[in-house]
Image (cartoon, helix red, strand yellow):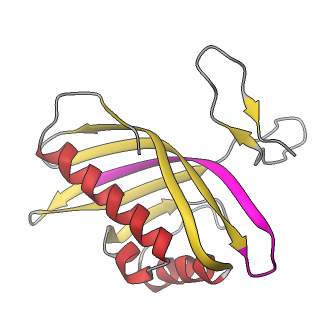
Amino acid sequence: MTTEQSQPSNEGTTAVVSLIDALAMAIRRKDVDAVMSVFSPDVVSFDLGPPLRHGGGSAFEERWRALFDAYQGSIDFEPHDLRISASNDLAFSHSLNRMRGTTKSGVTTDRWSRWTACYRKTNGKWLIVHEQVSVPIDMKSGRALLELTPEAAGSPPQRAPG
């Protein structure tokens, strides 16, 4: 994972990096309990699938189970270009995340998404209280552009082969 901090390292930045590392490991292992441990019980999530807003609790946990159940074996998950800004009890981050794996139907996926997360320290523990996951869309067709990859510095957007 590549990280760039928008301010000098502090306790919040260190805690957020640890939280993101734990989330990435949990996704790779498809460990729902470990995933849930980094989110606030009342998290608000603007994820890729409908509806427009997801809340925490059992419905949020079930979305993670459904995602993990769709894949055979582990999932390769890598946050890239991570940026973090943190204060004493609030922080936010954004990154480009790559997720690869093979679905149970045998389809190999390799997708990039944009992720923004907000964190709050409550009773000494940092948790994700809000997240937004998105992909660019073609404004004319309304089609999600799932084949995009991060831009190389100074070059136009790159599309994945195929």
Image vertical order of residue 152 relative to residue 126, above or below:
above
Residue stretch rendered in magenta on the structure: 103-119
Q: Position of residue 112 (x, y in %)?
A: 64, 48
Count of picture labels? 0
Q: Is residue 5 left or right of residue 28?
A: left
Residue at the (89%, 35%) spot, across then down: 140
Viewer-nearest residue: 23 or 132? 23
Residue 51 magenta: no
Q: Give the prevailing secondary structure in the magenta stretch.
A: strand
Residue at the (60%, 58%) spot, across then down: 99
Q: Is residue 138 left or right of residue 81?
A: right
Viewer-nearest residue: 113 or 105? 105
Q: Position of residue 103 (x, y in %)?
A: 73, 75
Q: Is residue 55 visible?
A: no
Which quadrant of the structure image shows residue 139?
top right
Q: Is residue 18 visible?
A: yes
Which quadrant of the structure image shows residue 5?
top left
Q: Is residue 120 left or right of residue 105?
A: left
Viewer-nearest residue: 70 or 58? 70
Image vertical order of residue 79 relative to residue 128, above or below:
above
Residue at the (64%, 27%) spot, across then down: 151
Q: Position of residue 36 (x, y in %)?
A: 37, 76
Q: Position of residue 142 (x, y in %)?
A: 84, 45
Residue at the (62%, 24%) spot, across then down: 152
Residue 114 magenta: yes
Which quadrant of the structure image shows residue 93?
top left
Viewer-nearest residue: 136 or 151? 151
